[in-house]
Image (cartoon, grey):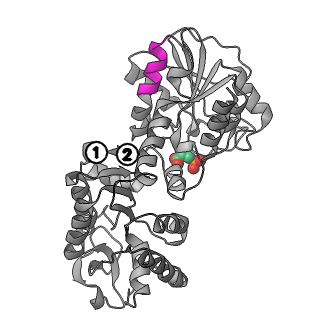
Amino acid sequence: SDLAQAGKLAGKRVLIREDLNVPIKDGKVTSDARIRASMPTIKMAAEAGAKVMLMSHIGRPEEGVYDEASSLAPVAKDLSEKLGKEVRLIKDYIDGGFEVADGEVVLLENVRFNKGEGKNTEELSKKYAALCDVYVMDAFGTAHRAQASTHGAGAFADTACAGPLLAAELEALGKALHNPARPLVAIVGGSKVSTKLTVLESLSEKVDQLVVGGGIANTFIAAAGNNVGKSLYEADLIPTCNKLNEIMSARGAAIPLATDVVTGKEFSPTAAAETKNVSEVVSDDMIFDIGPDSAAELAAIIKNAGTVVWNGPVGVFEFDQFGEGTKAISMAIAESSAFSIAGGGDTLAAIDKYGIEDQVSYISTGGGAFLEFLEGKILPAVEMLEKAAAKK
Ligand code: 3PG
């Protein structure tokens, strides 16, 4: 069920769980992507005349103690600016006792200050549920957490439904992974095979090309028998890489590896970059990017794709001399007619740096949740919503 089907919202107490876990510096929001993504839902509810209560976590504060550093105050300020009217931040709300006007939007203080949030206790969940007539789960970015505000509140609320942002994310991800236009190409970058192992395993059963980048690629390069010098890689995962290669080739699919790389002698913004054949890497080299030939090959794969799923850069793009590979991938995605979906903090930073935001078909607000979806896991908040819908 969705927000539009939740009945007439005018005058109703509507509790919306958003993911407003955004970076803050000096009391200011430094990246408002998640807030911007939540705005259509918030405006829809406010314009319908609901008493809108927004709830979110920010950071990972200790439960049971108020800590100003983890206050949602900067988010309330940002929301007020975006809405053009004050969004009050309510500190004490668990037992009710505050009024919200019809059409007003208030923000409830960081749910992670509340005892029982992390453990999803029945007591806290029921208190959240008692605050509202309708509970809306719209926080895709936190849908992989079974916590009181993302799970229990909905389970105990009279009416629980998915919000439009959550629904849109699930639809876009479902389109990319469950019913993709082929070839389906996944790009998985990152520092370690071990942290993305389940993602790689799950994708190896589905995709036509699995492009690996960063430290993950280094381990595959080492598995292919190359010297990776001082590059970041995981020797103990070489057998795993071999197995993934076998799974892929048995399906007629592939893990394309870089033939040329860009290396440096130190991890620093001023490190000199050297482009060389992958077989020419020496013992004091560190691989920091794919080379131009490999970038051109990947660009061709991406342009030919029906669907592209992107998580993680292929090089140390924060240093320009090691950013060409990630830039080439960005440009290829921008120029490709493939349905493209991207998620994760580093990926979003790359999209921002290379200015392709409008050319990616769907940018997910999820980090961990995006990865768990790629792993093929059922997100607990989604499961709760399905149960709530089945009860009706
Ligand atoms: C995220 O940033 O991935 C989500 O907001 C979840 O945050 P968490 O990992 O602290 O639960």
Q: Marks 1 and 2, Cα distance to the nearest angstrom? A: 8 Å
Q: Is residue 201 above or below residue 53?
A: below
Q: Nearer the viewer, residue 285 or 148?
A: 148
Mark 1 neighbour class, 10 Å CA radius: few under 14, some 14 to 19, many 20 or more: some
Quadrant of the image for the C terminus?
A: top right
Q: Amino acid at mark 2?
A: Ile
Image-based side of 64 in relation to 175, left or right: right
Q: Position of residue 277 (x, y in %)?
A: 24, 85
Q: To which residue does mark 1 refer?
A: 357
Looking at the image, can residue 327 be seen? Answer: no
Q: Nearer the viewer, residue 253 or 280?
A: 253
Mark 2 neighbour class, 10 Å CA radius: few under 14, some 14 to 19, many 20 or more: many
Q: Which residues are magenta?
A: 40-49
Q: Residue at x 27, y 78 (%)?
A: 261
Q: Position of residue 237 (x, y in %)?
A: 53, 80
**Magenta stretch: includes residue 215:** no
Helix, strand or loop at mark 1 = helix
Q: Which mark is drawn over residue 363?
A: 2
Q: Is residue 306 above or below residue 57?
A: below
Looking at the image, can residue 337 be seen? Answer: yes
Q: N-terminal of the two: label 1 or label 2?
A: 1
Q: Residue at x 40, y 65 (%)?
A: 189
Q: Residue at x 67, y 44 (%)?
A: 146
Mark 1 and mark 2 in contact? Answer it, CB < 8 Å.
Answer: yes
Q: Position of residue 329 (x, y in %)?
A: 26, 61
Q: Main secondary structure of the magenta part?
A: helix
